[in-house]
Image: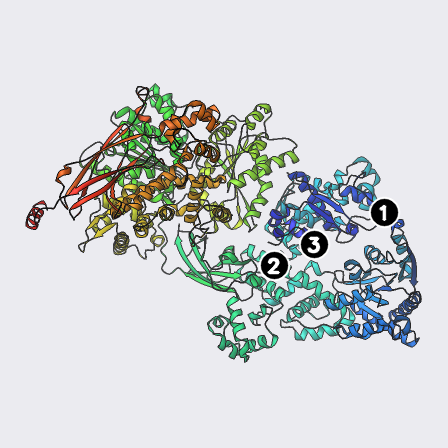
Amino acid sequence: QQISETQMIVTTPEKWDIVTRQGEGRAYTQLVRLVIIDEIHLLHDDRGPVLESIVARVIRQVETTAEPIRLVGLSATLPNYADVATFLRVNPKKGMFFFDHSYRPVPLQMQYIGITERNAFRRFQLQNEICYEKATMQRRNGNQMLIFVHSRAETGKTAKALRDLAMENDQLSLFVKEGGATQEILREELGSVKNADLKEVLSYGFAIHHAGMARADRELVEDLFADGHIGVLCCTATLAWGVNLPAHAVIIKGTQIYDPSKGRWAELSPLDVLQMLGRAGRPQYDTEGEGIIMTAHSELQYYLSLTNLQLPVESQMIKTLPDHLNAEIVLGTIQTVSEAVEWLSYTFLYVRMLKNPNLYGISDKAAKEDPTLKHRRMDLAHTAACMLERSHLIRYDRRSGALQSTPLGRIASQYYISHSSMAMYSRHLRPNMADIDLLRLFSMSGEFTHITVREEEKLELSKLATRVPIPVKESPNEPSAKINILLQAYISRLKLDGFALVSDMAFIQQSAARIMRALFEISLRRGWSSLSKLTLAFANMVSYRIWRSQSPLRQFKNVPEIVARKLERKSDIEWARYADLNPSDLGELVGVPKMGRTLHKLVHQFPKLELSAHIQPITRSTLRVELNLVPDFEFDINIHGYVQLFHIIVEDVNGENILHHEMFLLKNTGSEDEHTVVFTVNILDPLPPSYFIRVIADRWLHSEAVLPISFNKMILPAKFYPPTELLDLQPLPISVLGESALVKLYNFNEFNPIQTQTFHHLFKTDKNCLLCAPSGSGKSACAEFAIMRMLVNDPQGKCVYIAPKEETALHTYKDWSARFGSILRSGQVVQLTGEVAPDLKLIGEAKIIVCTAKQWDVISRRWRQRRAVQAVTLFIADDLHFLGGNVGPVMEVIISRMRFISTQKQQKQESQLRMIGLSASLANAREVGEWMGVSSKGLFNFSPKVRPIPLEIYFHAFDQSNFASRLMAMGKPVYNAVMRHSDSKPSIIFVPSRRQAQLTAIDLMTYRQSIEGDTFLSKDVDADGIAKIASTLREPALQQVTTSGISFLHDGMMEDDWEAILGLYRDGAINVLVCPVDICWKVKIVSHLVVIMGTETFDGRERRYVDYPIADLLHMMGMASRQGIDSSGKCVIMCHIPKKEHLKKLLYDPLPIESHIDHYLHDHFNSEIVTKTISCMQDAVDYITWTLLYRRLSKNPNYYNLQGTSNVHLSEHISDMVETVLGDLEASKCCQLTDDGDVSPLNLGMIAAYYYVQYETIELIAASLTAKTKVRGILEILSHASEFSNLPIRQGEEKALKILARNLPQNLPESAQFQDPRTKALVLLHCHFSRKALSTDLRTDQKRVLCDSINLIPAIVDVISSNGWLKPALAAMELSQMVVQGLWNKDNILMQIPHFTKEIVQRCEAYEGEEPIESVFDILTLDDDVRNDLLRLPDEKMADVAVFCNNYPNIEVAFDVQDADDITASDPVQIAVTLEREVDDDDEDEIDESEMGKVAASLFPKEKREGWWIVVGDTKTNSLLSLKRVNLLRKQKAVLEFMAPDEPGDYNLTLFCMSDSYLGCDQEYSVPISVAVGDSDDDESSSGGESK
């Protein structure tokens, strides 16, 4: 969050290392273009290796991604600066600048004082005297000086000692003049000083400065020193590093410093010394500066050579090599030992090894023999890898040299923990450790090996040991006890005295939180529940410094200590009950009534989730859990940040083992909503009484919710039957088909084992058959056997093939029309369009009909009236495993319906209907088979492992919890998978989204170029030819990657680009194809390798990532086999760690299929009520017994919320279901129920069934319309149709839609929510009318919205007409025209002509000819030269204009009111209307009838035929009297009938003729009628009686 919002990042090397070594941060760190490393001479320090690994990482990133990053290093003067330049890859001529001492702005005069005194106390006195002497000298010359000491306490001691010496010698006036301004200023400032030591010395002109002082004090001292009011400043080294305060003279008082990481006094690092000396001499004021170093006599020589620049900077990398190597392995940049050797060549270590081999243990001989030191680097890499392997951080395959990280390795890298510590933790961790054991383990960490117990600390430690809450077993003299005590003292907030202890405690505390986090991750990985909870609690205790027994409210910053104490005394009230107390109760509780409201607010800001779960057993060993989480607290960004993390943990009944763990992120934007998390858990055997789901906050103590899941009532599903065995048969040659015409259909010689085994049943018998086998096993050929049998044996036969997906149907149609088309007449292989009238015509002629489930549902609903549907003799249902997906219910209905028809045919002894089902391997194939009427001989259910070409499946799991980071982490492994498994054979990579497809393709191209230095094109491919094809593609990114042998596809591509790329792939010119997962059914290709990069995709409606449907995964895996080419296929699946086991189970074991029709019964019931199949409750119950649902209810009752399997349970459940559904339909006025249970359809139900519209949509339309609704209102009603509720909302689309909505001519309604698919539909329609350019994804969605809208609008018109409203009906018809032409109804109608722009329309409006140009016909009547001048379009565009204008309907309308003289009140009136299309006489002969009435609409996504509404209405009363919808070719007659008005008199009605496709061609005519008085009432009643 912070990184993404900023332009400049200032950080320490360690922090940047942590950010860049995690794949998580890569998404942001890739944006960095400049890295400045200050103080790069730190390379010589213990922290140097961190710099080396950062620089190596940056340089390698530049080489792999080819995106330049600039490196700038700043440093103090070094002797071997050229080596550092080489390491940073600097051009020595241009980029290297070196300034030695002579460039100092102020020359430095150095003094070295060696002290031989051994006694510590006397040494201290001596140093002070020397300091005093130097200080008085400087003050006499009016100079200021800095004295650097090496601990915070020392600053005060030194300053006081100097003050005392000045008093003794009576020289105070040297430091502050009596009565001067300085004295006044110092006295004034004294009041604001907080630090006691500073208070004592400040008025005397001395001051102190260290990081432990308050900020105000530090700033005061800095300002006073800068203004010259302070003469002598005693400070620690932080002043030299962090604050730029120069002085004339600098004294370094002693060179020994306490180092808590080593636990002893150590020599100052040379860098510190140089840094401090750098403060001597003030530019602009001094001509020279003075530096004085006091050190032990023995160290004099060292400091002399140091400051005279004789010590080169050396690399310290070898010490920490294993840890840095591990980080790179985890990051994925090193995957083999040879890559590790390569990586070492980027380090400063390598630069120095070449210059100074002896120091790094290389003999001169070895250096000569191996000039690049490859062997030495190999040794180093191998040794480091072995150490890591011993600590279980990596897997190291010595034969191939492959390095692979383990979960422990990832934890070590993420939490910056050394490999030795990790090894120690994994040895000593136990599942049921208590606080005491955990703290002992913590204190044994490798991080603390240097900490020792000094004499002077023992007393204080023994005191502390009695005050800490958790007992320490060891004696306080043990280092581990010291660490333990100090950590507890830190959490307890105890005050310490000794300086060394304080710095030790700070050092321990810095490591504590991350070590505890690491232990938490380890225990999670091992599935130890109680330890995970304990370590997570400790991590939070360290970060908040509170114990678990203290009040949870202490985690908020503003709770006073006294209040927290009072809450802790009231321990009888449980924390959970605080939420129920009101403010005054809370105030009373703590005895501070004023605090009541604050406490109440805090209690309600404490993270708390309400849980509820719905569980469904999928198999006997798998449980699907749908967990609902409702945030029950006030989300405040200042307290909770933008995101709160929670751990979802499923534990077994004893609370010992973790059965499932995943993270849940609660964002501030979703803090009000309910969230759903779906996961699967294994069911243990024997069945335990319950599981527990815990949701624990990641950063809060005591914030956890527990939900028990009881298994008392759970009934596990029935056991599945074993799969069919694949017999070892001799493969059949294709000649067994007999007829030569049939043999020619195949381009291979023999059938595969699965085809061979099923051949007899399919080709030699007429029995039903169900074939389940993995995708890619050649099941389509098996279906063809049945078709061939039908073609040979049954001249009258008709075959219907249904597929759940349009894409599958299209591929099958293309394939069969080419192959079967060669042996059948034209028009005998057809694909349905989805429009009823043309489809019925097609079915009448055809032999083989290909369609989707939905299309066949529309046609077969009225099968009793349609002979063509009854004539079907072979019914093939493909991809039956989709019964469990969202198309499932429709498939289930049509298969049940076809089964019903087949039994009806058998009863009448008509020709038999044969049913063939094809599917992926199913666990419960037997039930599906029984439901389809398949005998046990006709059931072939092969295991998923049985494939004609074996498939090797590799899983690769990633533990980044952030989706984008996980995809980035997969980048390099995808490249490696392609290189390793497919070796210039074709590969397909599936990614979650269109954008990712482009990114992955570009990544692969850059990896290949940077690592191998070439492209993916194979050697024998004509690169120029490919470049030529690439140059014709529309997308620049696509052109770029295609030339290097990679390409990507997506749904919004131009048709010819799509074909060009698939052509290149099939020809073998392109070897790698990247596709978004949503087109996996649309591409009909195979490859040697399939990589599935990520198994989830973002669902904007639910605002979460959802798993790919299992059918899609199986389909993608099935593409990895090229029959006749490969001996085996390969599939690599990259997924998130928590998903891995579940996916393995799903892909290796066959899939059980459950019915989902129970949620979708309404629309199917409604259609059956309209066709009279269901006319009472009993019919509805019988209808359900034909479905798969009925067979599954008894097999897996819990899945369907059934509590038992007896007949009573079943019949009650089904009756309830039927009653609920019919009740809903009645409530929405779609049908009518009588008390006897009879059901009859109502008008709304008929409209819904006729137009295939969901009942909820019809209910909404009927409820929302009024007599005054205008186009805008109808548009909103249309966009709220349930049909749009499953429009996808992708990552970040809400933002895009908001921006689009701002620029639309009409505002959206107030209530519009941008994550709502209906708002999206509305925005897309608005954009369509305003002709706004959209992104590729939105264009695809817009196509869908338009196709659905054109089907919904006639339904809206029918609902309006049944209410008899005229104006809304005309508005809805106008909306239909707007949808087809993509214009607002207020726009100029000339804009619907192709290529017309606003400029052309303005020229036409300004045209001053005889006739103004107002309609499309006026364009036709212009002279050619005038027209050319107005339009100024090139010829090919002019041709489009001509086509449109000639197609534009010119309709003659004639009407006749029948018996116009004899109209009486309340009697029927008939108007005969004739529509005739005017055609030029010259064109009379050429016109093709079938082409007539095709709509010219360049913006409408599919072919459309003109439709016309003829309406009679009365504009005065806004009443619609009669309406007919007609299709018009040449000429069409229609009779409109309506009742004459009740009152006699003259009426002026209007006849409207409205197009549904073109703007501006509607016509209206006035129809005057006079109504005479009707007969007398008695006649009326008698005649009325008869007519009834």
State left or right for residue 1066 relative to residue 1518: right
State left or right for residue 66 relative to residue 231: left
User: Which numbered disc, 3 or 2, marks the residue closer to the eye?
Assistant: 3
What is the spatial separation of the Cα atoms under label 2 and label 1, in whole angstroms?
46 Å
Q: Could you tell me if residue 767 is visible in this image?
A: no
In the image, 526 versus 624, the foreground residue is: 624
Give the percent coordinates (x, y) of residue 1253: 31, 44
Q: The disc labelled 2 sits on which kind of residue?
A: Arg
Give the percent coordinates (x, y) of residue 1250: 27, 41
Give the percent coordinates (x, y) of residue 1344: 40, 40
Count residues near mark 3 (Cα–Cα under 10 Å), then give few for <14, some for 14-19, many for 20+: few
Residue where numbered disc 2 is placed: 517
What is the spatial separation of the Cα atoms under label 3 and label 2, in whole angstroms?
22 Å
Give the percent coordinates (x, y) of residue 171: 92, 73
- Which numbered marker is on residue 11? 3
In the image, 1375 versus 311, the foreground residue is: 1375
Residue where numbered disc 1 is placed: 99
In the image, 1431 versus 1221, the foreground residue is: 1431
What is the spatial separation of the Cα atoms under label 3 and label 1, in whole angstroms?
26 Å
- Which numbered marker is on residue 688? none
